Image (cartoon, rainbow, N blue to C red):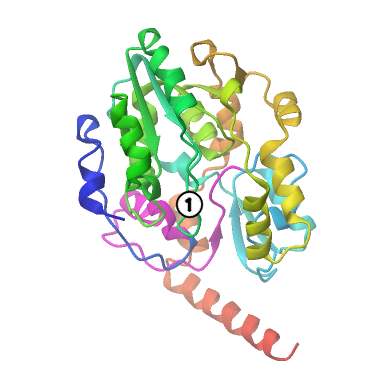
Amino acid sequence: MNESNLLSEYKHLDLPVVKLIKIRNELDRFGFSYVLANMFDISKPPRSFCCYMHGWFWVKDFRLEDSHYYSTPKTTTIIVATEYQKKIFIKYGFTNVVAGGLPFAYVRKSNAIRKARSLLIVPPHSLRYYNLTAINDELLDFFVAEKNKFSEISFCLHADDANNEEVTSMLRKRDINYIVGAHAEDANSLYRMRKIFDYYDYVTTTVMGSHILYASFCGCRVSMLRSHQFFYPRHTANMIEKMKSVSGFADRFMDIFNNTEKLELQFPWLFVDHPINAVQMIHWANEEIGSSNLLSKDFLMSVLGWTIKAKLRALKNIALNRLNNLFN
């Protein structure tokens, strides 16, 4: 990731600067451990000794293999968003599961002033190990034609796409602004996305993902653009199945992301013919993100292993798990 390129694209919003960090564990991803450290007046976040589920799992028939916890020791402490998810993990044999809300729910409202009738488009994004160019001429030309319906139109690019000259040149050619969103190795990612979603009035997307929930939580009018919905190609699903080593996951992946009929039944308000018809779903978003489950400072410090007593307990469990793996 070219940090200098990223910094040049979003100064008009005065977003937090990119602060690259080394990921030690799950709590560090997208800077969540730094959000908590700031809340607790800690200069640098200690290493954490639990798992904290990032991202929105929208499927109601959630299976353990849908996540990356299918090979995690069952004694590992895992924090999930909701009581519903907690029950599922317990059903799979996990013994230390806490409902604590998603990480994004802990990020306080920013000082951004929402711009009326502004629109943010969030396309699918590439991954470091897989280049996915999901922005095409047809999609861009649609928004160029609809510019007069909005006060501002911008694309939100994942950091791994912001340095893709093919993508950015297509946007510049049409005089469409773009900003850089989240990056897993940026300590300020969650702060940045909070400010972005506090600023834009409308958010539309062509693919399911956590951005739908986060934008709704911040009060945006979120929609899935039915006419330009992105469908993951089969080879993407096959690649992820190979990475996960979970037989049959490719079919599952295609059903989760590409089954429009099922998604429309579950989220009827999300699928619209035009982004201007989107509505706010703040109450729904608060339930999905687990706002009522946010944990206290003392409890978090303990469960994360940020106290001496909790750290010793966590190290003991790690040692026991290693011994168990050695003799089984």
Q: Quadrant of the N terminus?
A: bottom left
Question: Residue, x 53% and y 50% (percent of image)?
Answer: 54
Q: How many marks?
A: 1
Left or right of 93 on screen, residue 185: left
Quadrant of residue 301 within the rendered picture: bottom left
Left or right of 27 on screen, residue 6: left
Question: Residue, x 59% and y 34% (percent of image)?
Answer: 230
Left or right of 127 on screen, residue 283: right
Question: Residue, x 50% and y 16% (percent of image)?
Answer: 275
The residue type indicated by label 1 comes to Asn
- Inspect the magenta stretch and tell me whether residue 270 lies in it: no
Q: Which residue is mark 1?
A: 131
| Along the line of sight, the residue nearer the viewer: 140 or 92 | 140
Q: Quadrant of the C terminus?
A: bottom right
**Residue 268 shows up from this direction:** yes
Question: Residue, x 62% and y 51% (percent of image)?
Answer: 236
Residue 200 location in percent, x, y? 37, 23
**Magenta span of residues:** 27-56
| Along the line of sight, the residue nearer the viewer: 100 or 63 | 63
